[in-house]
Amino acid sequence: MKTKQIWITLLIMISIPGFILAQTNWITSGFNPIIEQGPTGTWDDGVIFKCDVLEVDDTLRLYYTGGSLGSAPYYMSVGYAWSIDGETWTKYPGNPVVSRHSQSWASQSIFNPEVVYDGLQYYMWYSGSDSDTTASLGYAWSDDGIHWTLYENNPVLEPAETGWDSRSLWCGGVSHDGTHYELWYTANSSTETLQQIGRAFSTDGVLWERDSLNPVLPFGDTGDLDARWLRVGGSIMDEPNSYVFYDCRDSTDGRNTITFAMSSDGINYEKSQYKVNIRSGFYMPNVIRDADWPVYHMYYANNDDWHLEHAKSLIGYRGLWLNQGLFVPGTGDPLISARYEGDADLDIFAEIKELQGTHETSLQLYDDGSHGDGLAGDSVFANTYDMMGIEGHFSVSMQAQSGTDTIINYPSEEQLINVGPIVYDSHDQLYPYNDVIGPGDAVYFDVYIRNTGEFGTACGVVVEISSTDTMSTFIGGRTSSAYPDILPGETQAPLNNFAVQVNENAPVGTPIYFDLELSCVGHFVSEETVLLIGHVAVDDEVLNLPEYPTLQQNYPNPFNPTTTIKYGLPEASEVSLVIYDILGNQIQTLETGNCEAGWHEVLWLGDTDNGYTVSTGIYFARITVGGFSETIKMLHLK
């Protein structure tokens, strides 16, 4: 029979005197969520959180907290589920196995179960409460892990009379070394409601003595992961080291982060300032080791929609990388490397798959000193991928195998790009329409990019522009654009146009340039300085004054959030430029008064006279010059 003895070696990623960084490279399960809320009207249709997992006789047993949606607060009890593979779970139909109604001191809620199996009997410790403000710890035992007997003198550990843990105790992790029990718990007080982590000891699981160093894991310093609060999820004993896994928060507006603390003497704990690579927002992690393979399993809670999830990690795997991510066909081949420091004799592979095609290949990586991997036996596995005749975008995954068995797969560790060359082709001035640029003009234009490669489609292309000199400045939101996928031999326009604002004092004949930087999936491709179409000109002949008042179509249209309206006057005139909504209500006055002859541009911010942003819809701009009036239709999108 297998007990809840979790032998975990947290391997070194970086070494600092007195500190070891533990396993942080996790991948989430494709079967998530593994435990969800029950159907409406059932005991666990409201909340699902804090679980404990152990393996007995090749069966994984999971004990979790559940609560009802129809009650306020959630009345919580303990449920049970089992699994053979850790991915597909079956809830016990007789849940809950420990009910809040069982004893008066825990009549409102029983939660945060921790279970130990000694080969003969199961033992459970849990939190219980009969109010919204306090919680104590109870104790129970079972012959089969399903039918439980509650200790008649519960609770076995209550809040202290004074101090940091005088309000509520949340059970977090229990272990047994053969002679005594060690219990980790989260607690707070009436004066400090945010949680810290403490510990207690017992020889029989009933009579507990608090650690004199409590709280063993207090709040961190400003800037630390746990500067605001900590909440323990589980503990691990791995002689000579001990580990505590917990979630925490660094600020009032932050999200939960999972991390750990380590001790070499079982007394003094040092916190890691590194979080695991599972996205923020998850909490109360419980970690066990796979019975057959060198893999850790983490079970944790997600309170966004109340469920449990599963992640796993290959012991000793530190990551996969490329010597570079972007290649031009014919200029070189990528060296793919991975670091694996585990003790197991595994074969390491890079799985390469085309993102928009059918090409797939498996490349074995070696630690023999002959494949670009450095020294033989240095834990770096590498190999060169021959890309002759292969173009496109590829994901590179890491797969570990033992013989014919696949142990674990880390999907899309890196992206490999072998396309192009991708080059600047041309640009097209969109506004002003006559290609003449006046002082102070906003100039809108498209930049065209060409894929000169033969086979591979260029994806994730982005162009960013900047001002070359003081003759122009940025226009917010018009300095960067992505591009549609560019097929080999094709040219594409940007998804959004670009714009610069010409200096109002730019002399006649001044050329306007812009700097262009081209990238592909975040990899730098090239940069160059480009001459914008047209030079600065101000005389009437060049500006081509209109014969009569003219209102041009706004640009851009549709627009969000702003648009430019241009009108021309053959002579100085009294002008009124007003915005109306589709019902004919006047909502904004953009121009009123005497204006000089020439072309004028007015920027509408998409707002009303009262400063409110307009909603999506059709609007009209109307200009009145003496007895002349003209109207254009505009579309505002959000």
Image (cartoon, grey):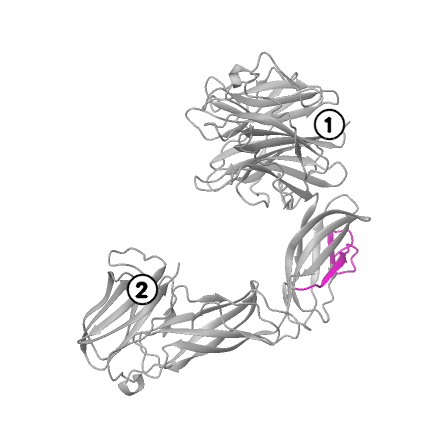
Residue 199: name its quadrant. top right
Identify the residue at horizontal 70%, vertical 59% (top origin): 352
Q: Is residue 353 on the magenta stretch?
A: no
* Quadrant into which the C terminus falls: bottom left
Quadrant (top left, top right, bottom left, bottom right) of the N terminus: top right
Question: Residue at coordinates 45% horizontally, 67% vertically from top-left?
Answer: 496
Q: Is residue 61 in view? A: yes
Q: Which residue is mark 2?
A: 619
Amino acid carrying label 1: it is: Thr
Rendering coords of residue 290 (x, y %): 72, 37
- The reply, left or right, for residue 107 in relation to residue 147 is left
Relative to residue 596, is residue 291 drawn left or right? right
Q: Which residue is mark 1?
A: 3
Q: Residues within 10 Å of mark 2 (few under 14, many from 20)?
A: many
Magenta stretch holds residue 371: yes
Label 2 amino acid?
Answer: Tyr
Q: Residue at x 76, y 55 (%)?
A: 375
* Above or below 212: residue 301: below
